[in-house]
Amino acid sequence: MELKDVVAIAGQSGLHKIVGRSKNGLIVETIGNGRRFSTSFQDKVSVLEDISIYTLEEDMRLHLVLLKLKENGNAPAAKDDMKMIRSFLIELINLDSERVYDNDIKKLLNWFHTLKDVLDFDKLKSASEALDADVAAENDAPETNAEAPIEEAKPKKAAAKKTAAPKTATPKNTAAPKANTKGAGASKTSYRPKAV
């Protein structure tokens, strides 16, 4: 199993493997018990490959953290003393202790212990090394000043500006009050008697 196939879903405990896709979301299988269900577009789904951890130098991708935990071999359990876990992670990955909460650390350790038997760490390590080589080659490549040919811009027609006449303020309630003609015996329609 690869890290790109593993997701965490908000409100659902544990990690889930992507099995397929449905019209409205993903079909996932819970790692450990094999329960399958589908997600909807309303569920917040996080792919573990896209997650990173705050460290003092820069953000560290989750796959690098998992590799370091695997190489160390004696990762603490999430139920251990939090001060001991924090000091362990500060030494291991230079964790930024101010920006990472206790719940995030517990979640990280639970994820590691869930994935340590099912995740292909050799493939993860080779993918990490290939990514590092690509980044190093990208940083070492000399910058070229070759500019792309600039297309000649066509002159745009200037839109005629509409100028509105200056608005003058009209005082409110300056009209003469209307006379009430209904009660005075007059009607709005004139009455014509029929000719005999």
Image (spheres, helix red, strand yellow):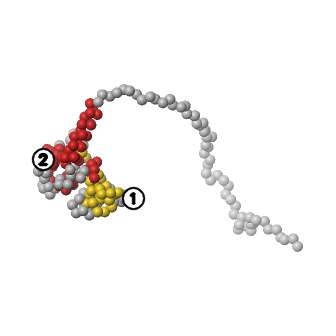
Name the secondary structure under disc 1. loop
Residue 53 shows in this picture: no
Q: Which circle's residue, 1 or 2, is located before the other in the chain?
A: 1
Q: Is residue 41 above or below residue 187?
A: above
| x, y percent for residue 46 | 30, 53
Q: Dot 2 corresponds to which residue?
A: 72
Q: Is residue 80 left or right of residue 169?
A: left
Residue ID at (42%, 29%): 148
Q: Amino acid at mark 2?
A: Asn
What is the CA distance from the residue labelled 1 to the residue labelled 2?
42 Å
Q: Which mark is residue 126?
A: none
Horizontal and vertical percent position of residue 61: 24, 45
**Residue 136 at x, y percent in the picture:** 25, 34
Badge 1 local density, few (<14 within 10 Å), some, or many (20+)?
few
Query: Is residue 94 among the parts visible in the rendering?
Result: yes
Task: Answer with left or right where residue 164 lies relative to residue 147.
Answer: right
Kindly identify the residue that appears in the image at 40 percent across and 28 percent down: 147
Q: Is residue 37 above or below residue 144?
A: below
Residue hosting label 1: 23
Q: How many residues crowd around disc 2 within 10 Å: few (fewer than 14), some, or many (20 or more)?
A: few
Q: Nearer the viewer, mark 1 or mark 2?
A: 1
Snapshot quadrant of residue 133: top left
Instruction: Say which quarter of the image contains residue 38.
Output: bottom left
Q: Quadrant of the C terminus?
A: bottom right
Q: Residue furthest bottom?
A: 196
Q: Amino acid at mark 1?
A: Lys
Farthest top residue?
145
Point 13% across, 56% down: residue: 80
How many marks the image carries: the answer is 2
* Circle 2 SS class: helix
